[in-house]
């Protein structure tokens, strides 16, 4: 669901949700209030962003979890490198996720090397002929320690 009203947060809490996705481009200036309401209700906010401005706002409002969606929710257009351009704007203390148009495990591994903590898969899981194998391959991947990511080592 697109969360646009505090009543939806209350319903999520009542149904045992641990987290909700709050879309920065949908909520606009109401994002901060919705994040605060979610916190009061004991729900973690996963703030979905697509642009540098949205990343700045999410951080300004105190987001602990940010998901960069490479698909623009307004136009539906996919920007396959959007996550790479926005990762360096987020401090390491923030849990970062990438979503939108991820179908190849190699792309997911590149995002991990860039410093993302995880990926959100939709179509990739549904359309893969062996989704269990895909998930296993992703989970078994061993990469660089987070503390040394972003030091340029993945360019060598």
Image (cartoon, helix red, strand yellow):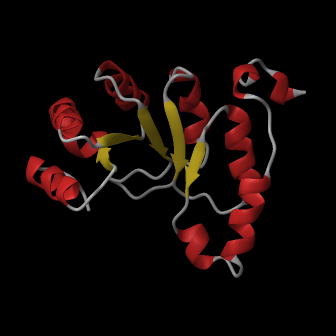
Please give the name of the residue rendered at 11% of the width and 50% of the height, measured from the top-left corner.
5
| Image x and y of residue 92, in percent | 57, 22
Locate residue 93 relative to residue 11 in the image: left or right: right
93 versus 22 height, above or below: above
Q: Residue furthest right?
A: 156
Callout count? 0
Please give the name of the residue rendered at 79% of the width and 50% of the height, measured from the top-left corner.
141
Please give the name of the residue rendered at 15% of the width and 55% of the height, measured from the top-left corner.
8
Please give the name of the residue rendered at 29% of the width and 45% of the height, measured from the top-left corner.
22
Locate residue 106 relative to residue 32 in the image: left or right: right
99 versus 56 height, above or below: below
| Image x and y of residue 142, in percent | 81, 44
65 versus 126 height, above or below: above
Q: Quadrant of residue 36?
A: top left
| Image x and y of residue 33, in percent | 15, 32
- Work out which quarter of the rendered image holds the N terminus and state it: bottom left
Foreground residue, 47 or 156?
47
Foreground residue, 133 or 150?
133
| Image x and y of residue 13, in percent | 21, 53
- Work out which quarter of the rendered image holds the C terminus and state it: top right
Q: Residue furthest bottom?
A: 129
Locate residue 23 relative to residue 136 in the image: left or right: left
């Amino acid at each position: 669901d697109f969360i646009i009203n505090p009543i939806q947060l209350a319903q999520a809490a009542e149904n045992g949700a641990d987290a909700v996705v709050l879309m920065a481009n949908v909520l606009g200036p109401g994002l901060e209030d919705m994040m605060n309401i979610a916190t009061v209700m004991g729900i973690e906010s996963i703030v979905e962003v697509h642009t540098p401005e949205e990343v700045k706002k999410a951080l300004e409002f105190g987001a602990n979890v940010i998901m960069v969606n490479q698909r623009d929710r307004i136009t539906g257009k996919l920007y396959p490198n959007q996550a790479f351009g926005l990762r360096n704007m987020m401090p390491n203390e923030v849990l970062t996720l990438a979503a939108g148009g991820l179908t190849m495990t190699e792309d997911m591994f590149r995002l991990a090397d860039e410093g993302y903590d995880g990926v959100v898969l939709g179509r990739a899981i549904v359309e893969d002929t062996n989704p269990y194998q895909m998930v296993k391959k992703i989970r078994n991947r061993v990469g660089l320690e987070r503390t040394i990511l972003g030091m340029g080592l993945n360019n060598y």
